[in-house]
Image (cartoon, coloured by chain):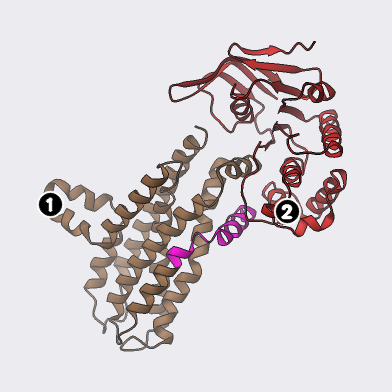
Chain colours: A brown, B red
């Protein structure tokens, strides 16, 4: 598995396909911290959505960065389809770790918050980014040319990101007929609801709720990863 | 190693081939010939397990190690040595063994050592084809499927490849390849099959 991940990340970093996502994310951070002080939990909410969008983009472009013929060669050398597909997810997850660290540490280093964060709060930021990033990755891997046509994959990705970034889920939750959409969308809105209740004075965020959020995220991502492996093992051989 | 019985393959409404019976084993290499567009590449991919067949039955040895040499090597952003090392490591081979194998293959194919540090995209067509072949022979496989492997190779490299195929076949690797050149096909094996609209037939040369 490690050798596959090394190969995936080495190929991806040289493909430069991560650059558009990286540039947009950097621009977002620059704008976000232009005015200080920044609300601690409101900022975590906003940066989580940005991390989620970045993660879907990184995952989608990472899967697309390997040539279709090379995928077939690699798959045969791997001898295990599930291992091959899971390696793509793990590669994207690992690739994103530096972004989580930078996004957690940057506002602390530049002192944009109205007070100092405790170590636990910084770790909470890191954990939220990791969970949201995991959700983004396990969704982003679906936007590839074996599942969608090239142009459709891009359009589907943009449409999906819009649903998450513009809080359409709130609209869905108020329309009885569409209420079910609220529950099948990635559970980022649960996080948003928790964070919106907190003020800058709150020091220990989401103790019980955070555990529930963690469990929901891990279960949702695991389900998506299983569906991805099943769909891809069928699509790769068509 | 792999047995195809009455196998057919279609993409959408387009029938690529049908009624193919083929047995590939280690006793001797199998060469598939046929006109352009008759479905040789698709058949090789079905035999390798890369593509799913649409009809018929494909039986293969469970857990068999299979390698594939495509007719067109993919565009990849790696140096030659680095790429081959990655392919070896993905197969679980130790680094020392991989390095020895790369050195040995580079010598047999007459590839200068400094090519290892050259980006594959900047190598000549023939060298890229050799790297394509080497990735499949870094370790002993149960089945190796090669699509037009002689394309772009010079005479010495063709001889080296025929030597390699013969040796691997003697060591128990089942070899299946496609080829357009009757003389080359005859040098490799007497099991030469022709793919046409009626399936696979024994090729009869004048």
Q: Image quadrant of residue A25?
A: bottom left
Query: Mark 2 — residue?
Result: B80
CA separation, marks 2 and 1? 58 Å
Report the magenta residues as a range: A1-22
Query: Mark 1 — residue?
Result: A175
**Point 26% across, 56% down: residue:** A163
Q: Is A129 included in the stretch rendered in magenta?
A: no
Q: In front: A94, or A159?
A: A159
Which mark is nearer the camera, 2 or 1? Answer: 2
Can residue A212 be seen by looking at this rendering?
A: yes
The reply to whether discs 2 and 1 touch (Cβ–Cβ < 8 Å) is: no
In the rendered image, the quadrant that contains the N terminus of chain B is top right
Q: In front: A46, or B18?
A: B18
- Tell me: residue A32, above or below residue B16: below
Q: Report x, y in % for residue A178.
A: 17, 48
Q: Report x, y in % for residue B170.
A: 85, 28
Q: Report x, y in % for residue B148.
A: 70, 32
- Tell me: residue A200, above or below residue A232: below
Please report, as a chain letter, where disc 2 is located. B
Please report, as a chain letter, where disc 1 is located. A
Can residue B25 be seen by looking at this rendering?
A: no
| SS assignment at label 2 | helix
| SS assignment at label 1 | loop
CA neighbours of label 2 inside 10 A, class few (<14), some (14 to 19), many (20+): many
């Amino acid at each position: 598995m490690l050798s596959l991940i090394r190969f995936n990340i080495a190929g991806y970093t040289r493909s430069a396909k991560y650059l558009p996502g990286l540039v947009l994310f950097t621009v977002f951070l620059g704008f976000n911290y232009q005015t200080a002080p920044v609300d601690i939990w409101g900022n975590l909410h906003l940066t989580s959505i940005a991390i989620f969008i970045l993660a879907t983009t990184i995952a989608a472009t990472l899967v697309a960065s390997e040539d279709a013929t090379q995928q077939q060669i690699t798959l045969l050398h791997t001898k295990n389809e599930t291992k091959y597909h899971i390696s793509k997810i793990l590669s994207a997850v690992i690739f994103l770790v530096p972004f989580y660290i930078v996004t957690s540490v940057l506002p602390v280093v530049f002192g944009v918050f109205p007070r100092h964060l405790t170590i636990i709060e910084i770790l909470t930021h890191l954990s939220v980014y990791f969970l949201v990033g995991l959700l983004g990755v396990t969704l982003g891997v679906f936007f590839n040319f074996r599942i969608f046509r090239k142009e459709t994959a891009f359009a589907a990705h943009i449409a999906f990101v819009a649903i998450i970034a513009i809080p359409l889920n709130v609209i869905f939750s108020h329309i009885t007929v569409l209420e079910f959409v609220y529950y099948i969308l990635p559970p980022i809105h649960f996080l948003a609801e928790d964070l919106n209740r907190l003020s800058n004075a709150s020091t220990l965020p989401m103790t019980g709720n955070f555990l529930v959020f963690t469990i929901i995220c891990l279960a949702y991502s695991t389900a998506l990863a299983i569906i991805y492996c099943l769909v891809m093992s069928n699509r790769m051989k068509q | 190693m792999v047995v195809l019985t009455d196998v057919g393959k279609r993409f959408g409404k387009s029938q690529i081939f049908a009624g193919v019976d083929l047995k590939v084993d280690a006793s001797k290499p199998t060469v598939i010939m046929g006109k352009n567009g008759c479905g040789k590449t698709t058949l090789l991919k079905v035999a390798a397990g890369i593509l799913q067949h649409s009809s018929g039955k494909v039986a293969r040895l469970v857990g068999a190690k299979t390698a594939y040499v495509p007719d067109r090597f993919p565009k990849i952003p790696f140096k030659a040595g680095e790429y081959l090392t990655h392919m070896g490591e993905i197969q679980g081979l130790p680094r020392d063994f991989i390095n020895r194998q790369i050195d040995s293959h580079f010598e047999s194919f007459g590839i200068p050592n400094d090519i290892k540090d050259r980006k594959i995209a900047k190598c000549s067509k023939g060298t890229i084809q050799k790297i394509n072949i080497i990735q499949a022979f870094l370790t002993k496989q149960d089945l190796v499927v090669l699509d037009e492997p002689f394309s772009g190779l010079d005479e010495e490299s063709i001889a080296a490849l025929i030597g390699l195929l013969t040796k691997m076949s003697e060591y128990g690797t089942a070899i299946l390849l496609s080829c357009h050149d009757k003389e080359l096909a005859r040098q490799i094996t007497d099991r030469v099959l022709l793919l046409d609209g009626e399936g696979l037939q024994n090729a009869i040369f004048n």
